[in-house]
Image (tube, helix red, strand yellow):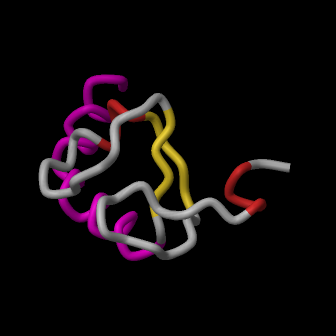
Amino acid sequence: MGKIEKGINCDVQGCDEKAERSMSGSKAAMATSLMVNSGKRVYLCRTHYKEWKKETKEDRETERARWG
């Protein structure tokens, strides 16, 4: 059973919602607007994950283009 299933909260400062996604700390740091508590793994609620996706869309597309 993982931490999300156990009910860990979102790692963004000031957010008390339940986390739905986890990612590496370096990936989460790509979004400069999110004030995330640093660590190896970062847990995000649905709202902050959507915000992260919107902010990093262009960076992720260029990174995928380098692969293939």
Q: Is residue 57 magenta?
A: yes
Horizontal and vertical percent for residue 26? Answer: 33, 30
Between 58 and 25, the one lying in front of the other is 25
Residue 22 inside the magenta-drawn segment: no
Q: Main secondary structure of the magenta part?
A: helix
Number of numbered discs = 0
Tell me residue 20's x, y (percent).
58, 65
In this view, 1 is above or below 8:
above
Place residue 64 in its image quadrant: top left
Residue 41 drawn above or below residue 58 = above
Q: Quadrant of residue 44?
A: bottom left
Asked which quadrant contains residue 19, the reply is bottom right
Q: Position of residue 62 (x, y in %)?
A: 20, 37
The residue located at (45%, 73%) in the rendering is: 16
Name the residue rendered at 57%, 71% in the picture: 18
- Extreme residue toward the right, this view: 1
Give the magenta-colored segment's residue range: 46-68
Residue appearing at x 34%, y 59% in the figure: 12
Give the position of the C terminus as an image quadrant: top left
Left or right relative to 34: residue 19: right
- Residue 42 point in image, percent of width and height: 46, 44
Judge by depth and name the residue closer to the eye, 13 or 56.
Answer: 13
**Residue at the spot 48% in from the left edge and 42% down from the top edge:** 23
Left or right side of 42 for 19: right
